[in-house]
Amino acid sequence: MEVSPDMDARLLPLPWKSLQIAERTFLCKVLFTDSAYCLLMSDLSSVWCEEVGAEVIQERSKELNKRLKAPISSFLSHLSRLLLPLLDSRDDGHGRFSCQWTENTLMLQVKSQLSGLPFYWEFHCKEARVTTVCRHLVQPLVCMTKALDCQSQELCTLLLQKDAEIQDYQESGAALTRSRLKTESFDEGSFQESFLAEKIPGLCSSWNSPGFTDRLQRLYSTVTAAEMKSNPEAEGVNEYPGFLPEPAQCAEKREHNTAAEDIQVPNESVKAENHQVPLADVLSLTQRSQSTVSKPKKKKAKGLFK
């Protein structure tokens, strides 16, 4: 299944979120407007998607909810309030969400109540085209890998400079006042070997539970926004409704949040976050604030040294 260019451009900067359904974890992207929605889901073995407009929504709602009559915007508002809070949460939507899948399709079923009446919905997701998979997963992840590798190199350089600064203090007669803070000189080769031997096995075992940390979600949003800026066809697409505000601890990490906008529907409303991410230096995304590295100068010992 192919996603329309307009919906694809609005969906691209949204980060992948974890969606727990029963005992299965998916990566999920979803975008709701007042007359349509687009859903992407992946378990890292397949990618499924569905994009539907007002006509399909109206027809499906009549089939699944014969007693319930409401505007399309109300259906979408209700669906977004059911689905969005589950993203990145430990709630598996038990009793409300279930899924069935075959080789080429995945059906996400929803059971709830709307205005006191039973409400049912089915997301009919089909396998996404290769171009969609590459655009939303492969290409951004390759860019993120390069960015994190460059960041790692910068941090290694900074550690070596810090070791040289400490050595200069010691040669000047300074001594550490608290022995528990003493560290060995940084050896990049040993660090890389230890990391590959100790950390990689654990990271590979997490493939069965896909998900991005808050930092990686921010990095993903930034590299995709940068890609859109470099693509002339993406110019003018500035708003990406369809996501609820993030938890407070995640909001604190974002230094450039924009104001949320409301999707107004009769008697209901869904708050959505504007996910336009300012284009900062990709290589310093996961650092809260980093001072400029300058050449160490000889000076009198202070702080931990005497």
Image: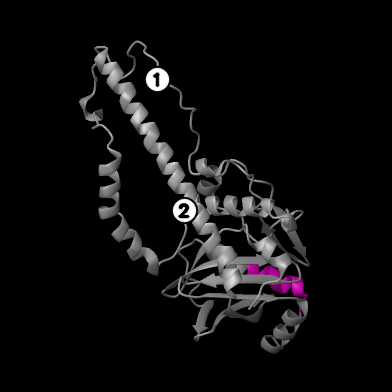
Front residue (pair 143, 80): 143
> Residue 66 placed where, x, y %?
71, 88
Q: Observer-nearest residue: 253 or 297?
A: 297
Residue at numbered disc 1: 296
What's the amino acid at mark 1? Pro
Residue 222 percent location from the top left of the image: 59, 50
Residue drawn at x 72%, y 79% as measured from the top left: 57
Range drawn in magenta: 70-80
Left or right of 34 in this view: 46: left
- Residue at image position (25%, 15%) is 171
Front-lying residue, 234 or 269 = 234
Q: Position of residue 268 (x, y in %)?
A: 73, 65
Quadrant where the image shows the C terminus? top left
Magenta stretch, overall SS: helix
Does residue 16 appear in the picture of this structure? no
In the rendered view, does 144 fall on the left or right side of 184?
right
Disc 1 versus disc 2: distance between alpha carbons? Answer: 31 Å
Q: Is residue 125 visible?
A: yes
For the image, the number of numbered tags is: 2
Tag 1 secondary structure: loop
Residue, disc 2: 145
Q: Alpha-carbon neighbours of circle 2 within 10 Å: few (<14), some, or many (≥20)?
A: few
Q: Quadrant of residue 53?
A: bottom right
Q: Which mark is residue 160?
A: none
Residue 71 belongs to the span the image colors magenta: yes
Q: Amino acid at mark 2?
A: Thr
Q: Is tag 1's residue or tag 2's residue first in the polypeptide sequence?
A: 2
Residue drawn at (78%, 75%), measured in percent from left and top? 71
Q: Residue at x 44, y 75 (%)?
A: 22
Left or right, 200 with reference to 13: left
The quadrant of the picture occupied by the N terminus is bottom right
Task: Determine whether 110 is above or below 159 in the image.
Answer: below
